[in-house]
Image (cartoon, coloured by chain):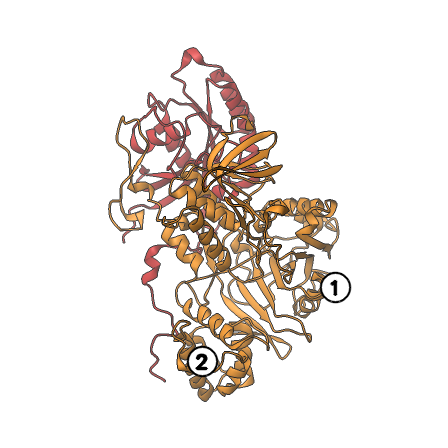
Amino acid sequence: MAKTYDCLFKLLLIGDSGVGKTSILFRFSEDAFNISFISTIGIDFKIRTIDLDGKKVKLQIWDTAGQERFRTITTAYYRGSMGIMLVYDVTNEKSFENIKNWIRNIEENASADVEKMILGNKCDLDDKRQVSKERGEQLAIDYQIKFVETSAKDSLNVEYAFYTLARDIKAKMEKKQEASNPPGARSGAHVLRASDQQRKPPSWLSRCSLL
Amino acid sequence: MDDDLPTDFQVIVVGTGMVESIVAAACSRIHKNVLHLDSSDHYGGLWASYNFDGLQKFIKEVNSDPEKQVQVYNLREQWYIEKESPSEEEKGEAKEDGKTEPSKKIWSQASFAAEYRKFNIDMTPKLLFSRGPLVELLISSNIARYAEFRCVTRVLTWLDDHLVPVPCSRADVFATEAVGIVEKRMLMKMLTSIVAYNEEEMNNEFKDWNDKTFKEYLTHKGLTPNLIHYVLFAIAGGTDAMPCLEGVRECKKFLMSLGRYGNTPFLWPMYGSGELPQCFCRLCAVFGGVYCLNRPIDSVETKTVEEGKTKVVIESKSKTLNCEHLVIGINECPKDLVSPEPAETCDISKAVFITNGTIMKSEKEPLTLLRFPPLVEGGGAVTVLEVGPATGSCPKGLFVVYFITNKVSDAETDLRPYADKIFDLSGGDQTEETDKPKCLWSLFYNVKDTSGAAGSAAAGVHVCSGPDAGLDFDRAVEQAEQIFKKICPGEEFLPRAPDPEEIVFEDDVTHGPEFQREDEDADGDAKE
């Protein structure tokens, strides 16, 4: 099977329940907004391949599967992630304050050089706003992370956010590859697939002409 | 924060060990309403992996809490290196490819602490047979997408006071100079009959060997002492007393898993065995399972609601939780609910070592299974697993080595003689060129073997056993499936979860996602 992309980035969405992580994911991957889903049943990750400076970049974006609800995200969720979208809800002060806790969680579990970006979602709901844009910007400056306000509902800045994060990851990767040649320290690890089954039979069973 | 935790579920699972997590995933997958709790703040229970900081906390916790020492006891941690590094700019990073070490890094307790996150140390390290039940389950359920694995690169044994590689594949057997051509024929013939062994229709080859040892069989087959050693100790993982048919079964398992992924029949999970329960938890959550850690339970009560129907009532942090079925890890379970009293089993002696090099040099970073024959009269065989930085287990320049055996006296007495054979346990200058790698840190501990007990005294309560001493996860998978079948008779055990590409959402519908399978191609890569 021919590869239809040049590189694959694993991205994560992190943030409190109800801030709109799944909506952002759907806006970006399906260009759809469905107000009806409140929790995240059945949604594991979504895929969209984008074009970045002539390269096909496959983005595999993982949702929390609701495990953020009682702060029970598995450490396995963070493995191999290259970029993380930290999402809060501009109409929910608590979700904004919790961004600091989520950053601590990331520092504890994700790779040290993971790219991060903060999203203040639901910026269409201006009349219910509790967190000003300036406070979001200040938080981002404090942590030296990029920031943008988004609206999954109005499709505002969602594309921009993912493209920005992907571009930053790509730039970091290229810089790293220049420094040391081996592409990715994790090469050589297996993902088990059904298709592996068709590989050679147990070698003891195969006939040996010597015997 | 826990206040909005719902109270009524079809299935409540307490404990996030391997068996509990598989059952949770299986129930949630067929749309049972599942709540999954754990009394501690991390996943895995006794099956967990810890970073170095987490491990220190775990040791402290156990040593200060007599109640915890029912499961884990005789903990003994030891450092072989200084608290602080001697001087600053003497270290010199370990080279990426490991070829040349102009100046070996000098490790200190402080440098371990500084890199604590790079460690993933397993409490229950286990391997997967490439064609074993767990690999097949991970693939058929599509849970394999949450994990990555590395192949074990070599199998070693201890022969004539040396480490020796065991020829694993047919090619290895023919390439090795240690075995003559006549022996090779004999070995191949014998292994072929082992592969043909079938328990149901006991074939002629083994029908008279029921009450004899595997060693007698191998001797009878005319194998030379070296070959007997390879087959009995390294391939079957046995001892002189191993019954013949058990040896045959173990060998067959080994042989059947060859040739799938690498040169040996084994896989090791990236970042450690503790990742695997979490993969099942993820699937459970994806299908709606609710997760809550740090949530001990205070009491369990069962009530008969109507004829043949029970309700299980759980008190947890002054909240009442109700369910039809409670699945509970034996370590979290009130004693009166376990029945019959677990039989006196042989506990497990374990040790973890962190060293500054591999036990036997090789071109690429090795991932090693070493099987020691018993070195003392009456002792058991010892299984050793050595994993390196490429598995995500430790920082560059180090190796983590696990020892497992059945307990005879205590972990340290049981295992130190074996460690002495392959490590330099004397401390001292780390840059010194030695035959054996220097041990920098070690931990000995005993674990209660609860794998035999799994009975429950009450309807609606299903008790899961703890980790066993075995090399693989086969018993955990088997037990999880049995429990699932009791809770959901007639239902499929972990049917394949769809790939994200296969889930089609209709616009503007209010009901949940519908699953639609497009084609049988399991590999989503080529689909865009």
Residue to which mark 1 is pinned: B426
Q: Is residue B491 left or right of residue B380?
A: left
Q: Residue furthest left?
A: B519
Provide residue A43's location: percent of width, then percent of height.
37, 37
Q: Amino acid at mark 2?
A: Phe
Q: Are marks 1 and 2 in contact (CB under 8 Å)?
A: no
Q: Residue at x 41, y 79 (%)?
A: B193
Is residue B286 placed above or below A97 in the rendered structure?
below
Q: Which badge, 1 or 2, is on the more N-terminal residue?
A: 2
Provide residue A178's location: percent of width, then percent of height.
45, 47
Q: Chain of mark 2?
A: B
Q: Amino acid at mark 1?
A: Ser
Is residue B89 placed above or below A65 in the rendered structure?
below
Residue B4 in view (yes/no): yes
Between circles 1 and 2, the one closer to the viewer is 2
User: Do the residues at pointers 1 and 2 share their chain?
Assistant: yes
Q: In whole angstroms, how far apart are the C-alphas of marks 1 and 2?
A: 48 Å
Provide residue A211's location: percent of width, then percent of height.
36, 85
Colour used to depict chain A in the structure image: red
Residue to which mark 2 is pinned: B206
Residue A181 in view (yes/no): no
Is residue B524 placed above or below B429 in the rendered structure?
above
The secondary element bearing badge 2 is classed as helix
Question: Which of the pair B134/B60 is nearer the observer?
Answer: B134
Mark 2: give few (<14), some (14-19) or many (20+) Cα within 10 Å.
some
Colour used to depict chain B in the structure image: orange
Question: Which of the pair B366/B97 is nearer the observer?
Answer: B366
Mark 1: give few (<14), some (14-19) or many (20+) Cα within 10 Å.
few
